[in-house]
Amino acid sequence: MPGPEVTVRFPAAGRVPVEVLLGQVRGRLETGDERVRAFLAAFGRRLLRPASARRHPELGSLGFFLRPSELARTVEEAAGEHVRVPRGLVFHVPPANVDTVFVYSWALSALMGNRNVVRLSPRSGPVAGLILDTLHEALAEADPAIADTQRIVSYDRDDAVTAALSAACDLRVVWGGDDTVNALRRHALAPHARDLVFPDRSSFAVIRAAAWSGAPEPVRVSVAEKFVNDAYWFDQAACSSPGTVFWVGTAGDCEAARADFGDHVARVLGERGWGVDAAMAVEKRVAAYGLAADGVAERVEFRGNALADVTLAEGAAPPRRWLGAGTFAHARIGALAELGALVERRDQTMTHFGFAGAELEELARGLAGRGVDRMVPVGGALSFHRVWDGVDLPAEFTRLVTVTR
């Protein structure tokens, strides 16, 4: 009796039993395999075509990440005194709400020489479909080793399929939140295998009020545009998108800077025609007024359906759950070091404006791993890096062989 089936979407092959899929993912690659590098570079060039990049800016970022020089740098930095070899078969479970994450995870794993099976949610959006179409374009000119070693599949939640893929893999990579991580961990791995997990995370922005108010108008316009990109590309649902904005300075400076910042953000949203549907607008109001009813917020301001600003009550903990696209909590602190008492382990990305590198490094050392894995300028929240959530992904996707002469 045939086992449970999956839909193979890359290379497109229709529905096949999971045991057949596992038998098809064969072949051998090396760490930094030239055939994979050529395929990824060709795929990245296609993503940078003006028609795609203008319509979906996140694809432009992905294409830039896959440029040949960056691939070469990744391979070079993975070198060392040991021999790096692939882990084997890697099973990826990316989130459904950010269509590009699966490519970053898969591409780095393939670059390190692994065979891969990626589970793409059946609920994935049109951007994922465009990515698959572009992958097939690049596959037509690729070495046969790519089709032999790489699979992207879709299936509805099916414990039998997940269990089979989990049991067969050497590394399971789980993105998408605490519930997903806990659900996947119910399925046993082989004794030698391991999990690499990316659970629920939250992120925030920090702006020095005096630096904002003292910046030339073109700079403030540019920063506002970058902040909108950070927050709105994935409806603020990306783990690295800011949910809270901390203003650093005196009360008067922060109030003035925040008001001007809000005007600039609202202007960018208006120029881009950004809005949310009625259902989302209602959800945002329920969430924002709920914070006020709970005593967490002392003021709530809506600027149309696209932007909601919530002023946190003094001493209130910043909310870390998603409040609806374009909803931002605001709080004032007197100095950057005060973040030490507010940061939690689940805090991932801190976007910043107006601070020197030495200040940021001092904060990172002071936090000492209690939270915040990335400190990047405003506009860099969604820029993927091979070191993510404090994890060196190329290193995790390989094993080290010690050779003593």
Image (spheres, rainbow, N blue to C red):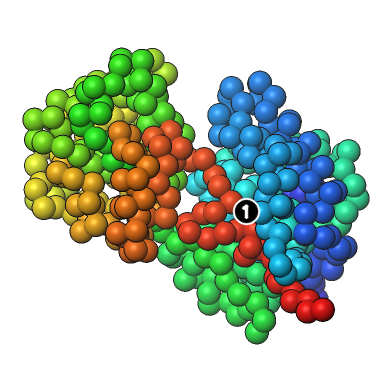
Q: Is residue 228 rendered to the left or right of residue 9?
A: left
Residue that appears at 54% across and 70% down: 184
Is residue 233 toward the left or the right of residue 169 in the image? Answer: left
Which of the 4 quarters of the picture holds residue 248?
top left
Disc 1: which residue: 105
Residue at the bottom extreme, as displayed: 191
Visible in this render: residue 43? yes
**Quadrant housing the N terminus:** bottom right
User: Is residue 281 placed above or below 188 in the rendered structure?
Assistant: above
How many numbered marks appear? 1
Quarter of the C terminus within the rendering: bottom right
| Residue at 39% in and 21% down | 222
Q: Which of the 4 image quadrants contains residue 27?
A: bottom right
Q: For residue 276, which quarter of the picture?
A: top left
Above or below, comparing residue 179 to residue 65 in the picture? below
Q: Position of residue 130 (x, y in %)?
A: 67, 35
Q: Position of residue 192 (x, y in %)?
A: 67, 81
- Residue 273 drawn above or below residue 117: above
- Residue 71 is situated, as x and y percent measured from the top left of the image, at 71, 45
Q: Is residue 191 above or below residue 400?
A: below
Identify the element where label 1 is drawn: helix
User: Left or right: 134 with respect to 283?
Assistant: right
Badge 1 amino acid: Ser
At x 29%, y 59%, the residue is: 366
Q: Is residue 235 visible?
A: no
- Label 1 environment density (alpha carbons within 10 Å; few <14, some 14–19, many ≥20): many
Residue 383 x, y percent position in the rendering: 52, 40
Q: Nearer the viewer, residue 36 or 174?
A: 36
Q: Which residue appears at 24% of the width and 22% of the height?
A: 214
Q: Is residue 357 left or right of residue 328?
A: right
Most foreground residue, 275 or 190: 190
